[in-house]
Amino acid sequence: MRSENGSDGQPRSFIEEARRRQIIASAVEVISEVGYGNASLARIAEHAGISKGVISYHFAGKDDLMTQLVIQLYVSAAEYIGPKVGAAVGPRNMLLAYIESNLGFIDANRNYVAALMDVVLNLRDAQGHPRFASADGEREIIEPLIQILLEGQQAGDFGEFDAELMAKSIRDAIDGAAGRAVRGEDFDLDAYAVHVCRLFDVATRKVGNDD
C-alpha cells in the first residue's frame, strides 16, 4: 500500500506520478469497454502492459484505484475550469464561463466521464454506502457556483432567487448533459452549452432587465 507520498514519506517522483496516471488511464479505458464490475486489476494491468504487482505497488487495491480515478478527474476538471472562470470579468461572465467550461470539459473527456459515472454508481464504503454520494460532497462541488451567484446578487447583476437552489439547478443541467453525452456519441454539447447559457442567463436576470 502506498501513502499519499512515497513509501518513505517523501513526495512521489515524476516517474511514480506518471505511472499512476498511466494506470488510471488504463482503468478508464477498461471500464469504458467492459464496465466497472468486470474491470479487474488483472485486466487493467494487461491493458497497461504491466504486471498486477505494479498496480498493487501504487494502489491499495481496486477500491483505492477507483477512488483515485474519481479524484483525478475532479482535479483535472478544476485545472481546466478554474482558470477560465477566473479570467472572466464580472459575475455574469463568470457564470457563463462556468457553464461553458464544465460542458467543454465533459465533451473533451467523454470516456473518462463515463468511467467516473460507473465508478460513482458502484463504489461502496465499508458500510456499503456509495463512496461519493454525500451531502458534504455535493456542497463542496456547488459552493463556488453559489458564491458567484451571491456576488452577482450583491453587485446588482442578478435578480432575487435562492442561490443554492439555482446552483443545484445549474449543476443538474451540467450533470444531466454528462449522462446524455455518455449514452449518445452524437449528443451535441456545443449546441447544448449555448442553450443552457442562454437559459440561465435569462433565469438569473433581474425582472425587467434585458441588457
Image (cartoon, rainbow, N blue to C red):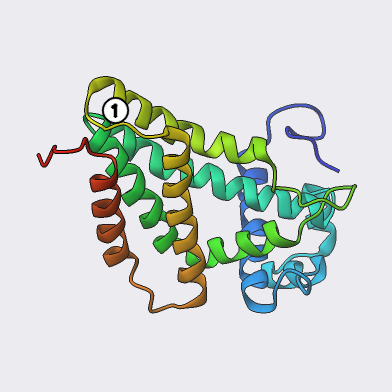
Q: What element carries label 1?
A: helix
Which residue is at 44% across, 63% downward?
177
Q: Which amino acid type is shown beneath numbered disc 1?
A: Gly
Q: Which sits in the foreground, 45 or 83? A: 83
Q: In which quarter of the image is the C terminus?
A: top left
Return the x and y of residue 183 as percentages of the image width and height. 51, 76
Q: Is residue 162 above or below residue 27?
A: above
The answer to whether 94 appears left or right of 4 in the picture is: left
Which quadrant of the rendered structure holds the N terminus?
Answer: top right
Q: In this view, does 51 lie to the left or right of 156?
A: right
Q: Residue at x 78, y 71 (%)?
A: 37
Q: Residue furthest right?
A: 127
Question: Residue 121 sits in which quadrant?
Answer: bottom right
Q: Which of 41 and 184 is in front in this view?
A: 184
Q: Residue at x 78, y 56 (%)?
A: 55
Q: Where is residue 53 in the image (x, y as percent from the top left)?
A: 85, 58
Q: Point out the residue furthest to the front here.
A: 207
Q: What residue is pinned by disc 1?
A: 152
Query: Disc count in the image?
Result: 1
Residue 110 vs residue 17, the one in the foreground: 110
x then y, percent, for residue 96 = 28, 44
Q: Residue furthest left?
A: 211
Residue 153: x and y, percent?
A: 30, 26
Q: Judge the density around disc 1: few (<14), some (14-19), many (≥20) Cα neighbours within 10 Å.
A: many
The image quadrant of residue 49 is: bottom right
Asked if residue 22 is positioned above or below residue 147 in the image, the reply reads: below
